[in-house]
Image (cartoon, grey):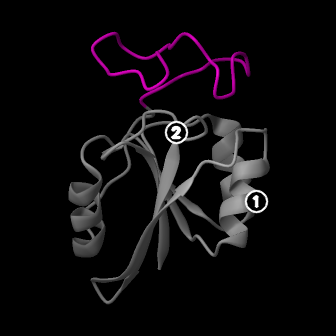
């Protein structure tokens, strides 16, 4: 299965659409077949789900995303796993073991406002790191 992980340095980004990059991992029978990091092509409503679908992605892992994005991924048959934080390698290990579980979105951008790489304020708890400050 091909998985895309929203990435900021060596950790999962709290904001799937505004992450600097995506770590793309191919996992077959619990083994990593291929791993690459690609730049985020830019956040435009509906673009990233289509972009990742064209790359053969079947699952997206992120700290958070809105309901609209989740719906768009579902339209492409891409599973969403949100509420994830931590180091990329630790997340990949859990994916390999089949133990990574979705939780509550870590970021609530709210009502479609402030989307894009240049967003300057977060609506998630203050103790969380913000990848765009």
Bin the neighbour count of mark 1 within 10 Å (Cα to Cα): few under 14, some 14-19, many 20 and up. some
The residue at the far bottom in this view is 29
**Residue 112 magenta-highlighted:** yes
- In-image side of 64 versus 57 (left or right): left
Residue 85: image quadrant is top left
The label shown at residue 127 is none
The CA span between labels 1 and 2 is: 16 Å
Bin the neighbour count of mark 2 within 10 Å (Cα to Cα): few under 14, some 14-19, many 20 and up. many
Which contiguous range is marked in magenta?
A: 106-133
Element type where label 1 sits in the image: helix
**Considering depth in this image, is 13 or 62 the residue closer to the camera?**
13
Report the residue at 51% width, 48% height from top: 21
Residue 127: image quadrant is top left
Relative to 54, residue 21 above or below: above
**Considering depth in this image, is 38 or 66 the residue closer to the camera?**
38
Report the residue at 52% width, 64% height from top: 59
Q: How many marks?
A: 2
Element type where label 2 sits in the image: loop
Report the residue at 65% width, 62% height from top: 52
- In-image side of 112 versus 104 (left or right): right
- Residue at numbered disc 1: 50
Residue 87 picture location, percent across and down: 24, 47
Residue 13 picture location, percent across and down: 42, 38
- In-image side of 78 versus 76 (left or right): left
- Residue at numbered disc 2: 19
Residue 103 picture location, percent across and down: 37, 42
Report the residue at 48% width, 25% height from top: 107
């Amino acid at each position: 299965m091909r998985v895309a992980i929203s990435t900021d340095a060596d950790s999962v980004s709290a904001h799937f659409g505004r992450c600097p990059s995506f770590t793309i991992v191919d996992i077959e029978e619990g083994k990593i077949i291929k791993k690459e990091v690609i730049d985020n092509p830019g956040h435009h409503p509906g673009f990233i789900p289509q972009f990742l679908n064209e790359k053969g992605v079947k699952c997206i892992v992120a700290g958070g995303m809105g309901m609209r994005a989740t719906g768009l991924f579902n339209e492409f048959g891409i599973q969403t796993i949100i509420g994830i934080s931590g180091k990329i390698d630790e997340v990949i290990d859990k994916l390999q073991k089949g133990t990574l579980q979705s939780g509550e979105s870590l970021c609530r951008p709210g009502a479609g406002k402030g989307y894009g790489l240049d967003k300057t304020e977060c609506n998630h708890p203050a103790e969380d790191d913000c990848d765009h400050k």
